[in-house]
Each structure stands twice: as C-alpha cells, then as structure tokens.
Amino acid sequence: MHLVKKIEIIANSFELAKILDSLDKSGVHGHAVIRNVAGKGLRDGAEDLDMTMLDNVYVIAFCMPDQLKSVVENIRPLLNKFGGTCYVSDVMEIRSVKCVASL
Amino acid sequence: MHLVKKIEIIANSFELAKILDSLDKSGVHGHAVIRNVAGKGLRDGAEDLDMTMLDNVYVIAFCMPDQLKSVVENIRPLLNKFGGTCYVSDVMEIRSVKCVASL
Amino acid sequence: MHLVKKIEIIANSFELAKILDSLDKSGVHGHAVIRNVAGKGLRDGAEDLDMTMLDNVYVIAFCMPDQLKSVVENIRPLLNKFGGTCYVSDVMEIRSVKCVASL
Amino acid sequence: MDTSLIVSNILNPPVLFFFLGMTAVLVKSDLEIPPPIPKLFSLYLLFAIGFKGGVELIKSGITQEVILTLAAAMLMACVVPIYTFFILKFKLDTYDSAAIAATYGSISAVTFITASAFLSELGIDYDGYMVAALALMESPAIIVGLILVNLFASEAGKQSERDFVWSEVLRDAFLNSSVFLLVGSLIIGFLTGEHGWQVLEPFTQGMFYGVLTFFLLDMGLVAARRIKDLQKTGIFLISFAILIPIVNAVIGLVIAWFIEMPKGDALLFSVLCASASYIAVPAAMRLTVPEANPSLYVSTALAVTFPFNIIVGIPIYLYGINLFWS
Amino acid sequence: MDTSLIVSNILNPPVLFFFLGMTAVLVKSDLEIPPPIPKLFSLYLLFAIGFKGGVELIKSGITQEVILTLAAAMLMACVVPIYTFFILKFKLDTYDSAAIAATYGSISAVTFITASAFLSELGIDYDGYMVAALALMESPAIIVGLILVNLFASEAGKQSERDFVWSEVLRDAFLNSSVFLLVGSLIIGFLTGEHGWQVLEPFTQGMFYGVLTFFLLDMGLVAARRIKDLQKTGIFLISFAILIPIVNAVIGLVIAWFIEMPKGDALLFSVLCASASYIAVPAAMRLTVPEANPSLYVSTALAVTFPFNIIVGIPIYLYGINLFWS
Amino acid sequence: MDTSLIVSNILNPPVLFFFLGMTAVLVKSDLEIPPPIPKLFSLYLLFAIGFKGGVELIKSGITQEVILTLAAAMLMACVVPIYTFFILKFKLDTYDSAAIAATYGSISAVTFITASAFLSELGIDYDGYMVAALALMESPAIIVGLILVNLFASEAGKQSERDFVWSEVLRDAFLNSSVFLLVGSLIIGFLTGEHGWQVLEPFTQGMFYGVLTFFLLDMGLVAARRIKDLQKTGIFLISFAILIPIVNAVIGLVIAWFIEMPKGDALLFSVLCASASYIAVPAAMRLTVPEANPSLYVSTALAVTFPFNIIVGIPIYLYGINLFWS
Ligand SMILES: Nc1ncnc2c1ncn2[C@@H]1O[C@H](COP(=O)(O)O)[C@@H](O)[C@H]1O
Ligand SMILES: Nc1ncnc2c1ncn2[C@@H]1O[C@H](COP(=O)(O)O)[C@@H](O)[C@H]1O
Ligand SMILES: Nc1ncnc2c1ncn2[C@@H]1O[C@H](COP(=O)(O)O)[C@@H](O)[C@H]1O
Ligand code: NA
Ligand code: NA
Ligand code: NA
C-alpha cells in the first residue's frame, strides 16, 4: 500500500470542463465524476436539480502527494471566481498491475 | 490549507429532510447530496432502487472541528431510530474567497 | 467514536457483482453503490456514459481494521484483471444502536 | 371452474410482460429498466387514469350510486387493517402486524389499472368514479395502522409514539405523491371535461396500454427480486398474502352485490379490496413504525399478493361476478 | 375587461397542471418529476416545435413578411436588454442589472409553446416561421448583456472582463443545447417537408399536448420552489417582473400591428417579447458574470414572470389583439 | 451509380438527426440526451420491433423459407468472426483480433431498425421473421471469438483462459438484456397475435419512427464523441471498418439470392451481415478478453461502421438488390 492524496471537488456542473482541464494541466490524468449532486453552499442557496441546470458535480481525483501543490494552484482561481469547494485528504492506494497513482 | 471535518452519512432517502435539518441546527449549513444510492446494510437487506422507494442518499458535509460534537448529538438519535451510518474524517480545505468552512 | 476503515473502489460497472462478492467473502457485508459515474483512468480513455455501457460504479464500504487484509487480497486480483482503483482511509464511526462496523 | 378467463388474462401483453420480467430475474439476465424510468411510467399511469376518471365523473355526475360506492370504499379501507391486524397478531409482534395490516388495507394502483385494462379488453364497462374510490382507499389504512400501534404497543413502543407528529403523518397519508397526483388529475379531468379529454386523448389513451405493458415488465423484475426475501417471511405470511386477498375480494363482492354495482365496477372494487400497497404505505410505515421489518410488509405485498392478483386473482374475481350477477 | 379569455385559458389542462405543481409544493406533497425526465420533455418539445416550424416554413416560403418578422424579433432581442438595464440600474449594481436585463431580453420557449397550444385550442392560425423568431431571440440578449457589463463595470469588474473568451461566449449563446436543437429540428423539418411530417406526426403532434401538460406540472413544482427566494428579491424586482413583460408585450403588439402580422403571429410575437429566459441566459450569466446573484435573475424569471405569462399574460395579450386587429 | 437512393435515405428525419447529433459534437454544443433516456429508447425499440416481428411471424407461420433464412443467419454469424479474425491477425495481436472479429460477427439492432424504417418508407415489404434472424445473430460471435482466443492465445494468455466460467459466458451471450428483451417480445407477439397488436399499436407503431429519430440523434452524439479515438486506431482498422461491412453485405446478398429471399428480407439480411455490435459484444469482451483494448473494438464499430451503414451502406445494398433481383 502506498500513500496518495485524494482531492474532492464539489462545484457547479458548468465548471466541470474547466476543473478537469486544471487537473490535467497539473498532471492528474485520472478522475471520477458524479453528476446530479444536489447541495447547498454559501453562495446561492439550495440547488434543486431542476430545469435551471444549477446542479453540482462531485469530482474525485487521486494523485501523488507531490502533484498536490500544482493542483491547488490551478484549482483555486476557479473556486475564487465561480465558487465550489475543494478538500484534500490522505488515503492508501491498493496497488494493482494497472494501478493509477504509481504512473 | 486548513483542517476541517468531513461528515459522510448514508441513510434511507426518507430521512433526508430530517438529516439536513439536524445539520442545519448544528450550524453546518453547507452540504452535498447524492441520490439513488444502492446499498446493503445490517437491517433490511439489499436496497434495490425500485418502485418501493427504499433507495439511499449519500450526504456529505464539511464542517469546522468544533461543530462536530453538536452534529453527532443531533444525528445519532436519527440513526438510532431509522438506521443509516455516519462517519467522520479529517480533510484539508483548499481555501478560496468563497470558501465554506471558514465562515 | 470508533476507528474503522473506509474502502473506496471505482471500477467498470460490469465488475460490480464480482466486487460485492469479494467484499462479502471478506466478511464486509455492508456497502453503498453509486452508479453512472463517469471517469478517466489509465486504461481506456474517458468513459462517456453512453450506450456502450462503459460507465463506472463507485463502491464505498466501511469495515473493521482487521478485515482489511482479507479485502485487499480478494479485490486485488480483480483490479489486476479488469482494471479499476481501490483506496483505503481511516474514518471514525458514529456509533448508533444499529451501527454497522461494530457487528 | 372455467379456466378460459384465466387463460385469456394470461395471454394479454401486460401479464405476459410481467412474466417476462420475472423470468429475466430467474435466469439472471441483466435486463433492467433503469431508474427513474419506472417512476415516469407510474406518474404517467396515475395521471392518465386520474384524468380519465375525472372526465367520466363529470358525465355521470355525483349520484347516489357514487356516494354509496365511495362510502363502501372508505368502510373497507378502515375495516380490513383492523381485522387483519388481529389475525397477524397470532404470529407476529404489534409493529409488524400493524404495518402489514396497513399494507393490505390500502391498495395497489397498478393492480387496479391492470384490471381496468382487462375489462376494456373484454368490452365490459366500468364507471369513472371508481378512480375516486381508488384514491379514497389509499390513505385511511395508514392512519388505522398507527392507531393500532398506539393502542397495542408495549411500554418501550410508547416511547417512539411520542416521536412522530400527527400533522406529518396526515400529510404523508393524504398528500403523498400518488394520492396527490391521482386526485389532482381527477379534479382537472372533472374541470376540463370532454374538451380536455379530446386534446389529451392521444397521450392519455393511445399510449396507455403500451406504458402499462412496459411498466409491468419492470414490476416483474421488481417482484422477482423480492422473492428471495420470502424465505425469511415464512409460510404463515405467504399463506396470508394469498388467502387474505381472496377473502377481501369476496367481502368486496358481497358489498358490491348489495349496493348493486354494475359488473365492471364490482370487479374493480373487489380488486381494490384484494390488493395491497407496496409504495405509499411502506414509505409511511418506515417513517412512523421503524420497529417493523420492511422486508416483511414490502415483500409479501410485492412478491406474493401483487403477482397473485395480476395473474389469477383478477380473472377469478370476474368469474365470481359472472356467476352471481347474471 | 372581458375575463372569459382568462377563464378559458385557466381551464386548460396545461395551465391547471401548472397550478397542481405549485399546489404540491405549497402543501408540501412529495410529488416530484425526477431528473432527467423534465430534460427529456423539454428536448422533446423543442424537437417537435422546431420540426413543425420547419415543415410549415417550407410551405410558406421565405417571403417579405418572414423577413420583416425576423428583423422585428432581432430588434426586440437587442433593445429590451438595453432599456431594462437602465431601469434596473436605479436599484441594483451593474452585474445584477445586466444579468437580469439579459434574462428579459431573451425568451422562454415553454411560454411560447403554451401560447401556441392556446391558439390551436381557439382555432386561431399562426405561421410556422414564428419558431424561427423564437430561435433568433434566444441568444442576442446574452451578448448585449455582456457588452453592458464591459461598458459599465467598475475597475474591479474590468478585471474579470479579461477572463472570459469571446469565442466561448458566442458558442454558449448560439450553440447551447436549446438553440441548437430548435434550429436543427427546424432545418430538418424544412428539408424533409410534408413527407417527413407524415411519418413523424404521431410522435411530434399526437403526444405534443400531453407532454406539454406533464411538463407544465414540473414547471409548477420548479416555480413554486423558487417562490421563497422572492423574499430576498424585494418588491422592486417583483414589480419589475410583472410590469416589464406587459410593457414588452405592448411594444411587441405595436410592432406587430405596424408590420401587419396576422392575429396568431402577433400573439406569439408579443409573448416572445414578454417572456424571460430561465435556462439559457442564466447558464451563460453564471459563467460570464459570476458576480451577479443567480437567485435574483433566475427567481424573477421563473417564479414571477413565467407564471404571470402562462396564467394571465397570454389571454390578456390576446384580448388586446382582439381589440385592435378587428 | 444511381445516387437517388442515397439522397432519399439521407433526407429522412432519422438520418438527418443522426447528422445533427454528430454536428453538435463537432461544433461543441452542449446538447446531450442525459442517461438513462437513451437506454429507455433502446429498450423501447427492441420491445416494439420484437413484438411486431412476433405478430407477423404467427401470420407467416414457420415455413421452410423461415428455416432457411435462420440457418443462413446462423452461418454468417459463425463464419464472419472466423475469417475476419485471420485478416485482423496480420496487424493485431490475438486478443484484439478476436474481440474485433466478434464485434463484426454480431449485429447492430439500430442499424437493422433504421433499414426497416427505410424499407417502410419506400413501400417495400419485409417479413416479420427477419427479427428472429436479428436475435439469432447477436450471440454466436461471442462464443466464436472466445474459442479463437483459446486456440490462438500464447502461454501467458492461456492463464486467463482458466479464469472465465463458460456458464457465465453463455449467459452473457444468450441472456443479455438486448437478446432477452428482443426474444421475449417476439414470443409475446407470437402468443398474443393480431389481438395484442391492436391494443398496443399506438404505442409500438405510432411512436416508433419518432423514437427512432430521437434515438439516432443520440447515436450521432455518441458516434462523434468516439471519432477522436480513431487516431489511435490507425488507417488499417478504419479501412477494415468500411470494407468488411461491404464484403459481408455482398456475401449476405449472394446467400439471399441463392435462397430466394424477397427484396426487403434480402436488404435486412445484408444489413445484419454488414453491421457490427457496439453494445452486447463489447460488454462480453471486456469481461472475457480483458487483454483486448476496448477503444479499438468499440470505436471502429461505433464511429465508422455504424455511420457508414446508416448513411451510405443501406441505400447501396438496396441498389445492389435492385440490380440483381429484377
Ligand atoms: N460545507 C459543505 N459541505 C459539503 N458540501 C458543500 C459545503 N459547502 C458547499 N458545498 C457544496 O458545494 C457547492 C458549491 O458551494 P458554494 O460555492 O458555496 O455555493 C454547494 O452547492 C454544495 O453542494
Ligand atoms: N459497512 C457499510 N459500508 C458502507 N455502507 C454501508 C455499510 N453499512 C450500511 N451501509 C449503507 O447504509 C444504509 C443503511 O444501513 P442500515 O441502517 O444498516 O440498513 C445501507 O443501505 C447501506 O447503503
Ligand atoms: N487517479 C484517479 N482518480 C480518480 N479516479 C480514477 C483515477 N484513476 C482511475 N480512476 C477511475 O477508475 C476507473 C477505472 O480506471 P482504470 O482501470 O485506470 O481505467 C476510471 O474510469 C476512473 O473513473
Ligand atoms: Na386492499
Ligand atoms: Na423577452
Ligand atoms: Na455482422
């Protein structure tokens, strides 16, 4: 097992393309995206998954600890501009032949 | 970066309103909700996402460490009564202008 | 509060039955499954949630620390064969009457 | 007994697709109707049946017959949960008994709709106001069930009694999405009448049978997935889930005969009495009687009573009617 | 004033189901149309209305009338955001003003479709090329809104100005899914003509009214959920959200009268002028003017202007037309 | 060559909406049909085509012609993967070759359905039992592909051979959701016959063309998104994905000519031979031959062969038939 960083981002779905770009630019090429996330933040009250397309996405990306700095630098301006939240934590990767963080 | 607590709750969807209320009462105003979560717990076997509306929700809320005690006090009676699971872990928040836990 | 392990697996949806079997065999009987997860890994480029059924599932299972070894042994061959990622982290369980990891 | 009615029922597309769904689960095919498609279909069916009922209610007017029928419906919705509760108490605790009793006191809209499609096929008329009876019979059992819990629960149970708020319970019972959409569509059908009917007809009438067929495919999948739960349920509950519908249908028929309902209405009324709720009541019970075991009350209603009514119940009840009405 | 038009509008299934949806939220029923079903319905409506418009456009041909109408549409789409911007600036900052102004400069396809269904009911004809006007009026307000922000934003605002790329903005404006599907279906309807119409007719025509009805049920839910946001909005914006549609409709009618549109077209044109966008424009504004508060521009358009137009606006505008056209 | 057939094919709503979907991706519009709507449409199409086939099968009966046709279908489903495997082996490894070969040995139901809609437009009849051929041709290629892997895989490959269970493979091949629903609907159509057809007609027939059109819009989106994968694929596979369908269609036509199929059946048969699976086979291959690269076998079938058949293949094959059958 191997220590990697888990990045969790919750943001409006229209930011998704920009977020994935930022991750990619920081060298984090793997990610998982859950759509249709309802939520409530500081900014605009409850997001009901209605016709107004104000639904959120939940993005998970696991990366090597040394990529983290670059990710934060790239993501923060997005959060500053459009809102959304980003959290980082420590997880252990179960290594497999096709494992992700090792490459 | 700043230490905050991540609260994850998996429970039947009919408890959702009560759970969000409890969080709110404890001063945790932000949250994200993923619906249509299938699962299997101790209580009632597999939840197939069928017409019987026994599907689960997955609620994520990030909060300040000092709010945690109040959240636990408010959520536990719900879990005792209706079932569901609640877990807490440490995460680092990437601060942004519109960041959440800092307010 | 009580320390338990959180296992997160992201894999192609066709592996789901095999993954849940492995968990079950390792004594981890509770789990939650989020379907329709889009993503990008090392292996086959972006998974668009299209007709080709290449969508992912996100499986979460909380277990006792001593079950972990067995889970890893059972899951790793699956990841080796079919791809997918598995991560483990520490979380605190909020104990309730119907709590999960304690049993 | 004449089995031709059963055969002609079974050879209908909806019932055959119900079988197909069950078969898919048994042979482990990966066939599934992904959520929320079944939800869409069930909203559609409630919308269409409610609207049609309203349009026909305005034609028939609110006559004495209508009022008698609705009174009979209310009566059955209140009596069934009480008498079944005492039967169930022989074997089960108060919570499970009350929850199951409430389930059988309420109704299954899909069973009703399947029966009405069966009547249409056979060219037997039925009145639009039976939809009002359907709507009326959904909720009372929830209230009766809770009263039973409050009366019979042990000390420990009394604690949880304090926990639920009656206003919430009443809202769950009378304003849950099925009742609300059904009654709402009924009222709108009543208000717009023949004119509204014409513009909506290709949607509410033309597609109706097809959507029902598709929906029963999903119900077959759902019911079959629940079958394994029946092991835990035990032989007592399985017998209960077949015999009680028959008993209720017979009571229903007797009442229908007394108040001189026409044939079609009598069938729908007995089907309402015989059917059990697997959506509204279980949802309400989980919130208000969390001590009861959902796999008991959901699985009996869904994996035994529902298929029983769809496949053999409906034609049997009609057979009974044919015997006595002529 | 003759209220019979309003009554006959309200007694239509779509409007009644809109009320039903609002009622569901007010009485706290758990009725909901789960995503992505509403998305499916809105795609269907755009597909059907666009296709029908294209088929009829090929019949009428591209005449001088068509060109005049489309020019009038473009004009209104550019002028409305400018003049409303200055009204809004009295009370709000540049960002909020520009975002709201853009919202009201654009249109609501569902309002248009409801108006066209209302016309069909009354047996009043309208031309297929009005759908082209609908498509044309969706986007310009977004561009005008952004230009207003660039011109009037303070220093601090100028910073964010550098951030967005015009090519992206233009793509959002002219190729967003509603405009794209509407225009695409229009072109395909134009290309396949009468023949394409016949094969698609049971789908695009037969189900149209039913889907619209179902969709307005959902719009009622969505609009009512937004009503609580109106507290934050204040009386100024609420009055704005009722008065400006009337003003815009009147301007629209005057233009329609000058260029001698037939009655049906005049109603649709005034409805386009009166309606406000709650999908395309808000999405674009969040990306390009993140400083503006979405609950202001979404809630006014969705919880005030949309219901106002659907319920009383459409029949009032038609009443006006009836006065002057005869 | 006479291009009028191609033009008349392209000017159909389904093909035009397929283009519209591809265009949406190319111009980066955000148009999308959110899941699970496309799933609903594909279930609907299988249901409708299967049911219709069953109803017509009972009319024609199971004659010698039927049996000959089904035997020819089985033959092609087994032979195509074998011969294409050896062609592919020139450039690719055993795993990729077998997976791609299986893909082309199987069929695409949507291509079949589009071809049958094209025939209906032109007023050319075809027999209901062609749906049975469709169902029969879906699975064998999976089995043949696996046998090829087992025979030709290197030592390292032999290891994974031990891993999969034949019973699971057979279930995936013969009971996967498409085959299961198609065959199930066929049987139910067969059982309920003309009577079942009449009650379901507005649903299965009336909406059919519209749903197909909508579905092809989504297929256009999906196919275009895959186009960028073709870079990795290389010129060899792209040529393969265009030439092999033509070769297979010609073989199919020759067989059809020998067993004297009528024109419509011959077209459908050649389309079955020419089409490649992008759902059932890829799913099975990922499970049983995980060594093969999915972007190779999915993208060629979806981004090259499918559009090729839909746009020019179908009319070309019909052109060939017109030449030889008259
Ligand atoms: N404290 C929180 N915990 C969990 N999710 C949050 C929290 N705050 C915000 N979110 C999510 O992030 C989204 C954007 O937040 P915001 O930028 O504050 O509007 C919200 O809609 C929520 O879904
Ligand atoms: N050990 C576990 N790991 C992950 N999810 C769980 C676990 N136990 C229960 N759950 C989820 O929590 C829901 C409610 O649990 P329960 O109250 O035990 O029925 C289940 O349906 C699962 O989705
Ligand atoms: N670094 C990562 N972070 C988050 N999710 C990942 C990562 N790598 C892979 N995944 C997810 O796991 C799935 C399978 O990965 P793979 O086996 O590499 O194709 C991908 O489709 C992603 O959804
Ligand atoms: Na009953
Ligand atoms: Na406007
Ligand atoms: Na083929």
Image (cartoon, coloured by chain):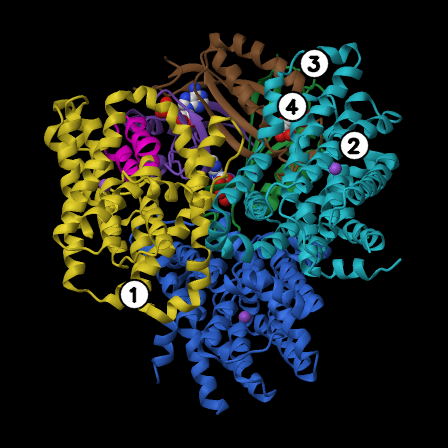
Chain colours: A purple, B brown, C green, D cyan, E yellow, F blue
Q: Nearer the viewer, residue F75 or D200?
A: D200
Residue at the image point whose x is 42% and y is 48% from the top:
E212
Q: Are marks 4 and 1 on the same chain?
A: no
Question: What is the CA distance from the residue labelled 1 to the residue labelled 2?
Answer: 61 Å
Nearer to us in this view, E8 or D64: D64
* Magenta-colored stretch includes residue E153: no
Q: CA distance from mark 2 to mark 4?
A: 22 Å
Residues under numbered marks 2 and 4 in contact, where contact means CB atoms less than 8 Å apart: no
Can residue C88 be seen in the rendering of this structure? yes
Residue E293 shown in magenta: yes
Q: Amino acid at mark 1?
A: Phe
| Amino acid on which the number 2 mark rests in the picture | Val
Closer to the eye: label 2 or 4: 2
Q: Mark 4 highlights which residue?
A: D287
For marks 3 and 2, the one nearer the N-term is 2
Residue interval drawn in magenta: E281-307
Separation of disc 3 and disc 2 at Cα? Answer: 25 Å
**Where in the figure is residue F304, as x and y percent of width and height?**
42, 65
- Crowd tier of the residue under label 1, counting other residues whose Cα lies within 10 Å: few below 14, some 14–19, many 20 or above: many
**Residue E142 in view:** no
**Label 3 sits on residue:** D160
The answer to whether mark 1 and mark 3 are in CB contact below 8 A is: no
